[in-house]
Image (spheres, rainbow, N blue to C red):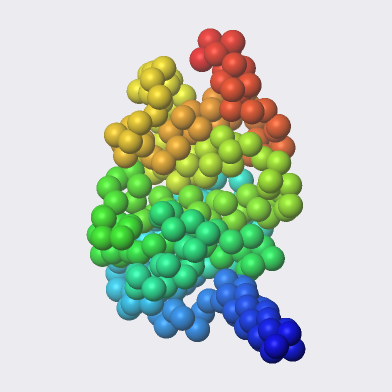
């Protein structure tokens, strides 16, 4: 009996190992599950549904324009973004973060970015049937997620030491098309907590973006200085407030 149990356990471990390896391989090289692709400049977008030429090219141009004005420069010769329209693909690739609109895997899993769905003709992201509204457009999500990939290039395993306000705030800063000045964003947000309506109107991380805007515009920090800081969110707010922010 014990021999049968051991054998069953061995088979179960082997099966689990195969599944784990298969999933890791798909994260690293998801192309077999995405039949359609389009490239412009450094960005390649792949989808499980046909990509309309006009809408797809406009989307890539808009995303590339946002990344070109980023204070954090891209180092790779190409970046891949995968659009998971089918529900089963969404569940598969968003397994670590089921509610996310976008997700990025670390370099040792390919360093690829994924979005939950897209309407290229309207430039809107589609998330479980919900259609996103500006400023969280498809180009915004593309630039936001690819900025995370580029951040990873600059910090490597140090990513886990970067405070969330700097990590997410910089991606938000890059992704927003109509970027407010520090004063405009500060006056709009005020002292109240950032609730859902404010996120819808000002992006996913407006409070973090306020801090990033302050350190870039007022303190003259570079993007690499932002990623190297170890200031907590509270400490960064204290610095900003002490300076009259």
Q: Position of residue 4 (x, y in %)?
A: 69, 89
Q: Quadrant of residue 58?
A: bottom left
Seen in the picture, residue 157 relative to 110 is either above or below; the reply is: above
Instruction: Please give the count of numbered marks on the rendered protein.
Output: 0
Closest to the observer: 232 or 12? 12
**Near-viewer residue (49 or 39):** 49
Q: Is residue 146 left or right of residue 10?
A: left
**Viewed as shown, does residue 17 lie left or right of 241?**
right
Residue at left 61%, top 46%?
72
Q: Quadrant of the N terminus?
A: bottom right
Q: Can you tell which quarter of the image residue 91 is in?
A: bottom left
Picture layout, residue 108 above or below residue 205: below
Q: Residue furthest front?
A: 1
- Residue 187 visible to the viewer: yes
The image position of residue 16, as x and y in percent, is 63, 78
Q: Position of residue 226 (x, y in %)?
A: 65, 35
Residue 33 image position (x, y, % from top left): 46, 81
- Residue shown at the point (44%, 79%) measured from the top left: 34
Residue 41 visible in the displayed image: no
Please name the residue shown 64% across and 60% down the image: 106
| Residue 218 figure quarter | top right
- At x 30%, y 45%, the residue is 134
Residue 157 higher or lower than 200, as above or below: below
């Amino acid at each position: 009996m014990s021999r049968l149990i051991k054998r069953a356990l061995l088979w179960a471990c082997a099966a689990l190992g195969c599944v784990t390896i298969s999933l890791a391989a798909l994260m690293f090289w998801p192309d077999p599950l995405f039949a359609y692709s389009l490239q412009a400049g450094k960005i390649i977008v792949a989808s499980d549904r046909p990509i309309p030429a006009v809408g797809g090219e406009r989307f890539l141009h808009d995303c590339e324009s946002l990344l070109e004005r980023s204070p954090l420069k891209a180092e790779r010769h190409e970046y891949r973004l995968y659009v998971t329209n089918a529900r089963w693909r969404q569940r598969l690739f968003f397994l670590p973060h089921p509610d996310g609109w976008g997700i990025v895997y670390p370099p040792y899993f390919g360093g690829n970015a994924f979005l939950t769905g897209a309407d290229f003709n309207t430039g809107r992201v589609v998330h479980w049937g919900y259609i996103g509204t500006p400023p969280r457009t498809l180009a915004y999500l593309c630039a936001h997620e690819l900025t995370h990939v580029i951040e990873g290039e600059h910090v490597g395993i140090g990513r886990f030491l970067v405070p969330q306000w700097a990590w997410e705030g910089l991606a938000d800063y890059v992704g927003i098309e109509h970027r407010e000045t520090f004063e405009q964003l500060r006056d709009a947000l005020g002292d109240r907590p950032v609730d859902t309506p404010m996120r819808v109107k000002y992006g996913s991380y407006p409070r973090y973006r306020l801090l990033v805007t302050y350190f870039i515009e007022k303190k003259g920090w570079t993007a690499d200085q932002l990623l190297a800081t170890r200031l907590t969110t509270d400490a960064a707010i204290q610095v900003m407030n002490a300076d009259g922010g």
